C-alpha cells in the first residue's frame, strides 16, 4: 500500500494515559479516555473495557454511537477496586498485587468509568441472577408476539431470553396492553406493547438526526414512546430507529410482514443513491431484494443511513427491466451483437465515436470504457446528477461514482461539460457512433413523473441539446442500460446491464473512499455485468487482454490509474480505503 | 469358511413329498379364504385401512373454532421443512386483512408441494399457532405436478377445524378490559 492510500478512519489522537484493569480475571491495558458517540474524549466505561476484552455484556439501551442513557439495567456487573489502607495508599498483598475490595453492590457497566486496578466480574452467580431479574421484569408486559413480530430473529429480547430467561412466566396478573400498530410517521409503525423503553430511538433522532421528535409520555406501566400529538415522525433518518430498536416496537412500513429476517442473505454492498457511499447490507432471498440496512463504517456512515437511500431498491426488481439483447429492435445474442459492434468500432474513423458513460458505473467498467476511449480517440463525458444535501449523510452529488469517472479520465472536474460538444458533433455529422452507458440522454422535461422512479432522489441536469431528432442522425446508437427509457427506445443496439446489487465492483465516494461491493442477486434474463462485454470490446477493438474478474480488473486498474496506485482488491477490505482526489 | 452341504436323504430325494407339502399350505389358504372368510388382503382402493391415531399423513392447515385461519405466516414451518416443500407468501404491504384482526397477519399464499413432503411432522411440531397438522390422508392423487402443489384454499378446506386456546382473542379481550390507558396515541 502506498503512502498516499491510508486505511486510517480517525485522525491520530494525542497520547492518552493507559490504565490496567482486569475483566473476569484477565488483565488488559486500556486508554483512560476514549472517543464517545460524538467523537469527544470521555472516560472509558466498563462496558467498553469489557468489549475491548472481548467479554460479552448484555445490554439494551447502550449503543456505541449514542449518548449513554443507563436505563435498561441489563449491563449490571460486579466490580472491585484496590483497597486503601489508613494511609490512603493501596494495600499490597504479599505477592505484590493490590488487595481488592469487592463492591457490595453492582453497577451498570455502560455508565461507570474505569479506574486503575479495577476488576470487573461479569460471570459471577450474582450477575447472572441480576440479568435474570432484569429480563424477567422487562418481560412482564412484553407480549408473546414473536410469530407475528418482524424483529423475531434479530431481537435482543429473544436472544437474552435464551441466555437468561425462564421457560415460564411467574406473572399471573393481566399484562398492560398498549396501543398496537401506531402510525408514527410515513415510514414507521410503533407497537407500544413491545417497547422496553430503552430510549435508543429518542436519542438517535435527537442526537444523530438532530430532530427532537420522539419522547416518552404517560407514567409508570403506561410509559409509551410518542411524537408530539399531530406531528409526524418524518425526518430523513427515521428508519435508523428501526435498526437500533432492540425489540420489535418500531417497525419499518416498507419491510413490514414482507419476509422473516432469518431467510435474508446479507451481502456487503454500498448505497448508490448519492456520493456519500454509505456501507450497507443487502438483504435478499431467492433473487429478490427485501431491504437495505446500514453497515458499520466509521469513516463513512458510522451506523446510519438515510431513509431515501435505504428505500431506493425497488427498481432493481422491476418487471420491465431490460432482459434481452436487441439489435435494431430484434432480439439477438450477445455474440452477434458484440461482433457487429466491434466491427463497427474497428472500422470507425478516429474521432467519429463519442461515449457518454455514467458515474453510476463501477470503476472497473469506467476503466475499460477509458481504454476504448483512448483507442477510438473518442470524446467522452458522463451525466451530472444533483440534488439536495444535508448536514449528516446526504450528498448533493447523486452519482455514486463521480470521482471514479473523473479519475479514470471519462469526465472532468465539471461533469457534463462535453455533452454540448457531443451534440454539436452529431449535428455537424462528425460523430457517427454514440455509446451510452446507463443514462437516459434524451433531453426531456425534468418534472416528467414517469421518469422519476429510478431518479427519485435526484434531478438530472439537462443543459445539453441531445434531442431525439439529433440522435436519429447517428449511424449507430449503442446503449447499455438497466431499465427501459427514451434512449433505449431509440438505440440500434440495446445491451442489458446489471444493477450494482447484481455484480461486484468498486466505487469512489465523494470524499475519495474506494469501496468495493459484492453481488447479492442474479441479473434477470440476458442481462450481464457490463465488464463482461466491455472486456470483449476492449479485446477486439483495442486488442488488449484484460482480467476476467472484477478483482483482477481492479488490480490491473490500480497499476494504471495514478490515483489508485498501490491498491489491491483484497486490500480494500470491507470498509474501503481513502485515496486523495 | 467352507460349509459342507449335507447329502440329501432318500426321502428328500424322492421330491414329491415337498410338492405335496407346498400344496397343503396352498389349499389351506384357499379353503380359509373361500369358505371361512379369513382374507389376508384388502380390496384397495375400495377398502382402506383404518388409520391409527398419531399417524403422520399429509399436512393441512386448520381453522379455529370461529372458522378463522390460524396461520399467522411466521414461516417457521417453511424454515424447518427438510425437503423445502412449504412456500409461504407473507402479506407484506398487500393490504390483506387477517381473519383475526389482532393477530395482525396471515399468509397471502401458503403452498405445500405434496410431491416433496416427506411427512416428517416438523411443521406441526414447530408451529407456534397450532395451525398445521399432519392428518390422515396418505394417498394423494394428481395428473400433473402442479396439481400436487396444494394452495392455501385447498389446504384449509382439507384441514378442517381444530379448536384450542385462542390466545389472540384472549389478548384482545384483555386489552378491551383495560380501558384506562391514559393518553391515547
Image: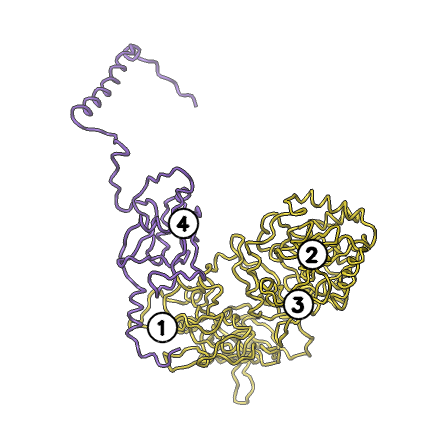
**Crowding near the residue tagged with mark 2, few <14, some 14–19, many ≥20 C-alpha atoms within 10 Å:** many
- Mark linked to residue B111: 4
What residue do we see at 46% from left, 59% from top?
A260
Name the one closer to the observer, B142 or B167.
B142
Q: Residue B53, percent across and down?
A: 26, 46
**Residue extending furthest left?**
B36
Real-space Cα distance between discs 1 and 2? 56 Å
Colour used to depict chain A in the structure image: yellow
- Are labels 3 and 1 assigned to the same chain? yes
Quarter of image, res A275: bottom right
The residue to which callout 2 is attached is: A437
Furthest residue in direction bottom, as rendered: A87
Q: Are marks 4 and 2 on the same chain?
A: no
Circle 1 chain:
A
Instruction: Tell me what residue is drawn at x 27 percent, y 53 percent.
Output: B161
State which mark lies toward you, 2 or 3: 2
Quadrant of the snapshot with the C terminus of chain A: bottom right
Q: Horizontally, is A490 left or right of B120 in the view?
A: right
Q: Would you name the residue on which mark 3 appears?
A: A275
**Mark closer to the chain start, 3 or 1:** 1
Who's the residue at 75% across and 58% down the image?
A: A558
Picture coordinates of residue A26 (x, y %)?
A: 55, 70
* Residue A230 found in image quarter: bottom left
Return the chain for callout 3: A
Q: Secondary structure at mark 4?
A: strand
Q: Label 2 marks which chain's residue?
A: A
What secondary structure is marked by label 3? loop
Q: Give the crowd class for mark 4: few <14, some 14-19, many >=20 residues within 10 Å.
A: many
* Distance between the alpha carbons at the discs numbered 2 and 3: 18 Å
Label 2, secondary structure: give it: strand
Name the residue tied to disc 1.
A141
Amino acid at each position: 500500500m502506498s503512502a498516499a492510500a491510508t486505511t486510517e478512519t480517525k485522525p491520530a489522537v494525542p497520547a492518552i494515559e493507559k490504565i490496567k484493569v482486569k475483566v473476569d480475571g484477565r488483565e488488559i491495558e486500556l486508554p483512560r479516555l476514549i472517543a464517545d458517540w460524538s467523537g469527544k474524549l470521555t472516560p472509558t466505561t466498563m462496558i467498553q473495557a469489557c468489549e475491548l476484552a472481548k467479554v460479552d455484556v448484555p445490554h439494551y439501551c447502550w449503543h456505541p454511537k449514542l449518548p449513554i442513557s443507563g436505563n435498561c439495567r441489563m449491563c449490571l456487573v460486579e466490580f472491585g477496586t484496590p483497597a486503601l489502607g489508613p494511609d490512603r495508599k493501596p494495600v499490597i498483598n504479599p505477592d505484590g498485587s493490590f488487595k481488592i475490595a469487592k463492591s457490595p453492590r453492582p453497577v451498570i457497566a455502560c455508565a461507570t468509568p474505569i479506574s486503575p486496578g479495577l476488576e470487573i466480574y461479569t460471570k459471577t452467580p450474582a450477575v447472572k441472577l441480576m440479568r435474570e431479574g432484569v429480563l424477567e421484569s422487562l418481560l412482564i408486559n412484553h407480549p408473546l408476539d414473536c410469530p407475528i413480530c418482524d424483529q423475531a430473529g434479530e431481537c435482543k429480547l429473544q436472544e437474552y431470553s435464551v441466555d437468561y430467561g425462564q421457560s415460564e412466566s411467574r406473572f399471573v396478573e393481566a399484562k398492560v396492553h398498549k396501543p398496537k400498530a401506531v402510525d408514527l410517521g410515513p415510514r414507521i409503525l410503533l407497537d407500544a406493547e413491545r417497547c422496553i423503553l430503552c430510549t435508543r430511538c429518542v436519542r438517535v433522532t435527537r442526537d444523530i438526526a438532530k430532530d427532537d421528535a420522539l419522547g416518552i409520555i404517560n407514567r409508570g406501566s403506561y410509559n409509551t414512546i410518542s411524537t408530539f400529538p399531530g406531528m409526524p415522525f418524518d425526518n430523513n433518518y427515521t428508519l435508523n430507529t428501526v435498526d437500533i430498536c432492540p425489540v420489535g416496537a418500531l417497525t419499518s412500513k416498507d419491510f413490514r410482514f414482507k419476509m422473516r429476517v432469518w431467510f435474508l442473505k446479507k451481502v456487503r454492498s454500498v448505497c448508490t443513491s448519492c456520493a456519500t457511499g454509505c456501507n450497507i447490507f443487502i438483504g435478499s432471498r431467492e433473487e429478490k431484494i427485501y431491504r437495505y440496512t446500514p453497515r458499520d463504517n466509521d469513516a463513512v456512515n458510522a451506523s446510519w443511513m438515510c431513509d431515501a437511500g435505504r428505500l431506493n431498491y425497488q427498481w432493481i426488481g422491476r418487471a420491465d427491466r431490460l432482459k434481452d439483447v436487441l439489435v435494431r429492435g430484434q432480439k439477438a445474442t450477445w455474440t452477434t451483437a458484440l461482433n457487429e459492434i466491434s466491427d463497427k468500432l474497428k472500422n470507425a474513423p478516429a474521432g467519429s465515436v463519442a461515449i457518454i458513460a455514467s458515474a453510476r458505473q463501477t470503476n472497473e467498467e469506467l476503466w475499460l470504457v477509458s481504454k476504448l476511449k483512448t483507442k477510438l480517440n473518442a470524446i467522452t463525458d458522463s451525466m451530472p446528477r444533483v440534488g439536495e444535501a444535508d448536514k449528516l449523510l446526504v450528498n448533493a452529488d447523486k452519482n455514486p461514482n463521480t470521482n471514479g469517472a473523473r479519475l479514470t479520465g471519462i469526465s472532468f472536474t465539471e461533469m457534463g461539460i462535453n455533452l454540448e460538444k457531443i451534440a454539436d458533433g452529431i449535428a455537424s455529422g462528425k460523430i457517427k457512433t454514440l455509446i451510452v452507458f446507463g443514462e437516459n440522454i434524451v433531453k426531456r422535461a425534468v418534472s416528467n413523473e414517469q421518469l422519476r422512479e429510478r431518479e427519485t432522489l435526484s434531478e438530472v441536469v439537462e443543459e445539453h441539446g441531445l434531442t431525439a431528432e439529433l440522435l436519429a442522425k447517428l449511424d449507430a446508437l449503442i446503449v447499455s442500460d438497466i431499465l427501459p427509457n427514451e434512449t433505449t427506445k431509440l438505440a440500434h443496439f440495446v445491451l442489458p446491464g446489471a444493477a450494482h446489487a447484481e455484480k461486484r465492483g468498486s466505487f469512489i465516494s465523494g470524499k475519495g473512499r474506494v469501496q468495493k461491493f459484492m453481488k447479492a442477486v442474479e441479473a434477470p434474463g440476458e442481462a450481464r455485468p457490463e465488464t463482461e462485454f466491455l472486456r470483449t470490446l476492449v479485446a477486439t477493438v483495442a486488442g488488449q487482454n484484460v482480467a476476467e474478474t472484477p478483482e483482477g480488473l481492479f488490480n490491473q486498474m490500480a497499476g494504471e490509474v495514478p490515483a489508485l496506485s498501490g491498491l489491491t482488491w483484497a486490500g480494500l477490505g470491507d470498509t474501503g480505503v481513502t485515496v486523495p482526489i | 469358511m467352507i460349509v459342507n452341504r449335507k447329502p440329501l436323504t432318500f426321502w428328500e430325494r424322492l421330491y414329491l413329498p415337498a410338492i405335496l407339502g407346498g400344496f397343503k399350505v396352498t389349499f389351506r389358504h384357499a379353503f380359509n379364504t373361500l369358505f371361512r372368510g379369513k382374507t389376508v388382503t384388502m380390496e384397495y382402493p375400495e377398502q382402506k385401512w383404518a388409520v391409527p391415531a398419531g399417524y403422520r399423513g399429509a399436512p393441512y392447515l386448520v381453522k379455529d373454532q370461529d372458522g378463522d385461519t390460524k396461520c399467522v405466516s411466521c414461516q417457521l414451518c417453511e424454515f424447518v421443512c427438510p425437503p423445502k416443500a412449504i412456500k409461504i407468501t407473507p402479506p407484506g404491504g398487500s393490504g390483506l386483512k387477517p381473519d383475526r384482526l389482532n393477530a395482525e397477519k396471515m399468509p397471502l399464499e401458503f403452498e405445500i408441494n405434496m410431491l416433496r413432503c416427506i411427512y416428517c411432522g416438523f411443521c406441526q411440531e414447530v408451529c407456534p399457532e397450532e395451525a398445521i397438522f399432519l392428518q390422515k390422508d396418505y394417498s394423494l392423487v394428481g395428473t400433473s405436478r402442479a396439481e400436487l402443489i396444494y394452495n392455501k384454499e385447498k389446504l384449509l378446506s382439507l384441514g378442517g377445524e381444530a379448536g384450542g386456546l385462542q390466545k389472540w382473542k384472549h389478548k384482545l379481550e384483555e386489552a378491551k378490559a383495560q380501558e384506562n390507558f391514559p393518553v391515547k396515541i
